[in-house]
Image (tube, rainbow, N blue to C red):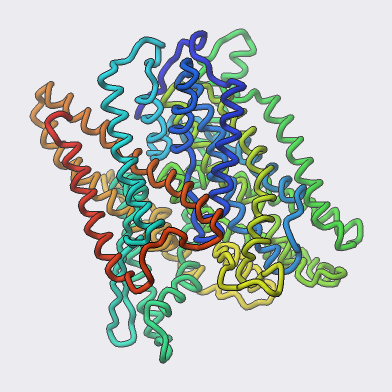
Amino acid sequence: MPHSTQHNLTELTELTVRGVILGALITVLFTASNVYLGLKVGLTFSSAIPAAVISMAVLRLFGSSSILENNMVQTQASAAGTLSAVIFILPGLVMVGHWQGFPYWQTFGICAAGGMLGVLFTIPLRRVMVVNSDLPYPEGLAAAEILRVGNAKDAAGNDSNSDDVRKGLNDIWAGSVISAAVALLTSGFRVLSEGLNVWLAAGTAVFRLPLGFSLALLGAGYLIGIVAGVAVLIGVIICWVFAVPILTVLTPTPEGTAIATYATGIWSKQVRFMGAGTIGVASIWTLITLFKPMLAGVRESLADRKHAAAGGTRAMTDRDLPARAIVLIGVGVMAVLTLIFALFLLDAQLSLPLLCGLVAMSLLFSCVFGFLVAAACGYMAGLVGSSSSPISGVGIIAMILVSLLLLASGSIDHLLAAPGSSKLPIALAIFVTSAIIAIAAIANDNLQDLKTGWLVGATPYRQQIALLIGCVVGAAVISPILELLYNAYGFVGALPRPDMDASHALAAPQATLMTAISTGIFTHELNWTMILIGVAIGIVLIAIDFILERRGSRARLPALAVGLGIYLPPTVGMALVAGALVAWGLQLHLAKRKASGDKTELERVERIERRGVLVTSGLIVGESIMGVLLAAVIGASGRDEPLSLVGSGFAPSAQWLALIVFAAVIIWFVRRLLQKAA
């Protein structure tokens, strides 16, 4: 695995005031964009890579920035792309009628406290999951490559090879321009489709053959590799070749309903829970397998601290926040979380013992389950990247557990009897799950950032400080943005004014789903069958993967990635698969060239592999930044498709045009890497 780069820290600036200010500004921009897009389509993007690009462009104007300072800016700003994931659950409080808006201090407190716990929980995981792990961390690797080629000085502070820097930047910009252009044609002008779906019916069984055309996901798939890609493909096959067709046989499509609409509804309302069950059991297995090395990593960190206290020294690239600082910050954050939970329940006029018991239970669940989730989500981010890590899947598991915990506590009757709060049990489950999602989101991001820092030689404790700052800044703007969007558009099933047009309401799909789950548990109407089927599938997959590992087989079957294939929209999964297949094909070709043993040829292969990372990083950057710009245009215009050049009747043509463009980009990408100048 790549090693961290050692720096002359007396020469290179790292955590600076101007960097913190720039990071805060980028955080506000990307938080606003992600909240809107997440409420509208149920997806957010990782902001680490575009933040790195913006940081380099701005700090170059000062003429004295370093790779480490740019890394700190992207570390802080990346909190925006992940902490905003709380919008996957928080709007549920408005949907059930418990809130009529988004109270600033409660919203800020739950987001900031959850996010900061996410930072603290991942500190003891850094060694085992970043330093001593072969997890790819695709976005972390991509961000590191972008930072390396975008800085005019090498790790030692000496002048870099300007020709290499120029070529590297050209690769990034080439990928960025193409990806941004395709994203504009797709999400802006609507002349290209985001995916191609072929629907087939065999009797009453409905099958779906999906393709996804996101170039950012193509790049992420290239970085995660063939093992994870094949596992995602297996998940898509389980979902759309077996599960949905079987269910459509058991409950045929009603007369007058399109098979695409009906089958998609079955996936979202039933089969997706199967994916959540698989993700859940795979996450638990991941925690079990990580427990021993995680303890070893914590033990090693404590030993290093004792060594340092005795006068020994540690490399700057291996220094986390001091144990005393972690404890003090942790106690402070838990005190804030306790206060926030108490404020949330205060209006219910509960008895003091019941209020204290519920606050204690909420805090304990947030801390204990939050730590387990931090480890599982960090692993998932390392496997498939932050953008593709199913935060909402983890939220579903948390929602189920906290709802069952409330049922088991025997306090439901008292909560239902609270004045004006017939939905208080559901609301409390949503609020506690919001803390879990904030923890999970930041754990996703923090380990990805620490991977970037490890590769470029950053100081971990300074990155951890930057991310704590990012959590506070991001949390500060989430409530006003949610309030603004709610009053402007409303949410499906929850409009702030009776005269509003419901067709313009934001879908908030994950919040709707999780609210339905909690409601189903408390009303005893939740369908457990699909969740338990997913658990069974996960157990079988874990057993197969364990056998393959014991036999020393190079083939693996990560259950977590299979669960992702079931849970994620199939166009997302298939775009990842396409990128993984491209990477696999190139690896086979390059392996033959490596076999020659010629030194010149080996150097060329190494350059090709490096350029592959840079171009795919550009693909991620371009689509992400165009997503920000389009979100701003949509928000300013107040229309869903302000740049659309075509009507809905153009959709079939847009699918086939997108397939042609997608194939052309893949051909361009492969030819660019294999050209003689590589």
What residue is shown at x 57% (from left), y 19% (from top)? 304
Quadrant of residue 29 within the rendered picture: top right
For residue 563, say whether it is visible: yes
* Residue 559 left/right relative to 124: left
Q: Nearer the viewer, residue 394 or 13?
A: 13
Quadrant of residue 207 within the rendered picture: bottom left
For residue 547, say whether it is visible: no
Count of all numbered marks drawn on residues in the image: 0
Work out whether 645 lies above or below 593. below
Point out residue 603 in the picture as x, y percentages from the top left corner: 18, 24
What residue is shown at x 63% (from left), y 10% (from top)? 310
Point out residue 198 in the picture as x, y percentages from the top left corner: 28, 72
Work out whether 672 lies above or below 639. above
What residue is shown at x 63% (from left), y 35% (from top)? 120
Q: Quadrant of the C terminus?
A: top left
Point out residue 626 in the picture as x, y percentages from the top left corner: 42, 47
Q: Nearer the viewer, residue 645 or 216?
A: 645
Quadrant of residue 484 within the rendered picture: bottom right
Point out residue 665 in the picture as x, y percentages from the top left corner: 24, 49
What residue is shown at x 57% (from left), y 63% (from top)? 508
Q: Quadrant of the N terminus?
A: top left
* Residue 584 left/right relative to 77: left
Work out whether 480 lies above or below 399. above
